[in-house]
Amino acid sequence: MKRRIIKIDENKCNGCGLCAKACHEGAIGMVNGKAKLLRDDYCDGLGDCLPHCPTDAITFEEREALPYDREAVEAKMRAEGKTIPPQGGCPGSR
């Protein structure tokens, strides 16, 4: 399936890890001192990580990727003892 997903430019990444901390779904991790998209199906395509990157190493791209798997993300979050955010709609409208 073709969808909007993040892309991390390893050459621009300074390894600060701020994007990985900002990624609530756990799609981004640190590998050998650089941010990596670990799982396409964990990336919701909303880009919460983008404003946290001080080097603008993260952008969006439209490409073939696994569909976002909310159930897998929620199971991972439960296993890690994290709070699962409410689903759907603008947070201000809840």
Image (tube, rainbow, N blue to C red):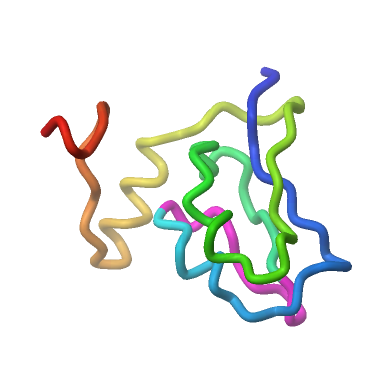
Residue 63 on image: x %, y %: 76, 27
The answer to which of 81 and 34 lies nearer the viewer is 34
In the rendered image, the residue lying farthest to the top is 1
Comparing 82 with 52, the one in front is 52
Q: Is residue 45 above or below residue 47?
A: above
Left or right of 11 on screen, residue 76: left
Residue found 69% across the figure and 68% down from its top: 35
Provide residue 86's location: percent of width, then percent of height. 20, 40
Give residue 24's quadrant in the image. bottom left
Q: In the image, what residue occupies the spot 24% across and 50% down?
A: 84
The quarter of the rendered structure image containing the C terminus is top left
Q: Quadrant of residue 13?
A: bottom right
Which residue is depicted at the point 74% across and 74% down? 34
Q: How far from the left and from the top, in percent, is residue 60?
A: 69, 39
Quarter the N terminus occupies? top right
Outermost right residue? 11
Residue 36 in magenta?
A: no
Question: Which range is magenta?
Answer: 25-34
Q: Position of residue 90 (x, y in %)?
A: 26, 32
Q: In the rendered image of this protein, does residue 11 appear above or below residue 62? A: below
User: How many numbered callouts?
Assistant: 0
Nearer-the-camera pick, 38 or 15: 15
Q: Is residue 59 left or right of residue 39?
A: right
What's the residue at 54%, 37% (across, down)? 45
